[in-house]
Image: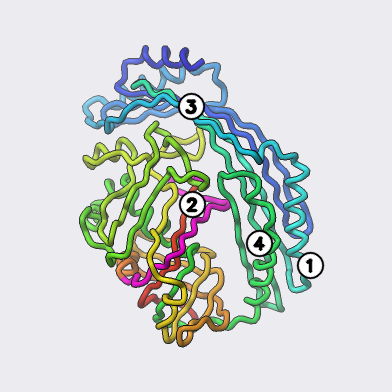
Amino acid sequence: MRERIKRMVSKEKVPFIEVHLEEREGVEIYYVGKELESLNQFIDIGGNVRAFSNGIWSFASFNSFDELESHIHFVAREARLGSKGRRGRLAKIKPYVDEVTVKLDDDPIKVPINEKIKIAKSYNSRILRSKKIQSSKVMYEDLFQRRFYINSEGADIVEEKIYCGISFTALAKDGMNVQMIHKSKGDTSGFHIVKGLEGEVEEVKKDAIDLLKAEKVKAGVYTVVADPLLAGVFVHEAFGHLSEADFVYMNKKMQKIMQLGKRFGESNLTIVDDGSMRGERGFYKYDDEGVPSQKNYLIKKGILVGRLHSRESAANMSEEPSGNARSINYRFPPIVRMSNTYIAKGNMTFDELIGDIDQGIYAVRARGGQTELEMFTFSSAKAYLIKDGKIGPMIRDVILTGNVFETLKNIDGIGNDVHLHGGLGGCGKNSQFPLPVSDGGPHIRIRNVVIGGE
């Protein structure tokens, strides 16, 4: 069939055309409280065709391959008609021919569904054992994906991807006081990632109960030490999206702010996006334009040195493609997206990070938040006071706000421990959610963070 597609593509008189075909299968298990809320085992097949001519894209997706030739002809014609009098180009790349297969000793797709249900049910039952727990949520998910990519330049790539993960949520209640803690685990390494998590389930349950009696934080300006998960959410949401070149190219204000060579932090700060990290949820060998994934430095020793690109955005900004054109599935065209985004390792121990803080906050994991250009607001899942260089009592309702560029400059300590987190969920952009990504980093220390509270 691939040779037949190549012949179809070669007939069209358009500068560039590509064909994506996709097979997906997986399982979703969802417990709410004592009930098995949903059990979904699915198979999905479809594809899309995209054509480019002088700055104009034409796109069509479909679930049946029977009319593939007519879809190819349609998008080629629409791209030609729409591009009259316009200019645009794609950055040149080498067309790759490759087949990437996944072979795991504990492939989750081969695990009986009853075993998956048993694991999810056991974690859910463990959460509900305490009388202080009002409700629970446990979600298991696995997904196998095989994608075929062919374009008019000679690329012919088959790539398989696999994911397995689980999340658990405990909701504790004492009168009108309701507290919730959520945690998830997941990556592309195999079924073992969801096994043996009893300790983490117990931690989630205990944290939710402990939050019931935790004091609310007092509003003020603090030195904050963020754990790797919160540091990862910050670097992804507050900075990573600003590094996506399609956004920068369309925004004159951000073009002035995000100038390469500009200093954004101290010399100990390095931020990376790397889709080639095997095992991480955001791993892939080729993006959805056939560009190899790679390690892209965004900030290096405090200096802005790069950004994330598709072939079109790279051409528009006279830069190199970075391998970051991605879509969540065949129903959507690829756009510029992150992969595995993290702050690189520093040289400080945790004790050194907190040791000279007279009064501060240790913020752990993110519960939610939002960004608006360079401004951000994040809530930590839980937090602790730091007093005279020691971790103190748990506090709650810790909301961090600020300007991302000022915050980057205020990072004055970076730990020597790096942890990346995938888990269930993913990244959202332009109605495409959830895109598989990981984010993380080491513990980081940030001066002058505005904290909302009482």
- Label 2 secondary element: strand
Bounds of the magenta span?
410-436
Question: Which of label 3 and label 1 is nearer to you?
Answer: 3
Residue carrying label 3: 99
Residue carrying label 1: 129
Earlier along the polypeptide chain: callout 1 or callout 2?
Answer: 1
| Residues at marks 3 and 1, CA–CA distance in whole angstroms | 48 Å
Residue carrying label 4: 169
- Residue shown at 38%/73% (left/top)? 446
Kindly identify the amino acid type of the residue bearing the numbered disc 2.
Ser
Kindly identify the amino acid type of the residue bearing the numbered disc 3.
Glu
| Residues at marks 1 and 2, CA–CA distance in whole angstroms | 32 Å
| Residues at marks 2 and 3, CA–CA distance in whole angstroms | 24 Å
Residue 15 placed where, x, y %? 29, 22
Q: How many numbered marks, from 0 up?
A: 4
User: Is 207 situated above or below 47?
Assistant: below
- Residue shown at 34%/47% (left/top)? 296
Q: Residues within 10 Å of mark 3 (few under 14, many from 20)?
A: few
Residue 375 placed where, x, y %? 36, 65
Kindly identify the amino acid type of the residue bearing the numbered disc 1.
Arg
248 and 262: which is toward the camera? 262
Query: Can residue 141 be spotted in the picture?
Result: yes
| Residues at marks 4 and 3, CA–CA distance in whole angstroms | 39 Å
Residue carrying label 2: 438
Kindly identify the amino acid type of the residue bearing the numbered disc 4.
Thr
Earlier along the polypeptide chain: callout 4 or callout 3?
Answer: 3
- Residue shown at 77%/71% (left/top)? 130
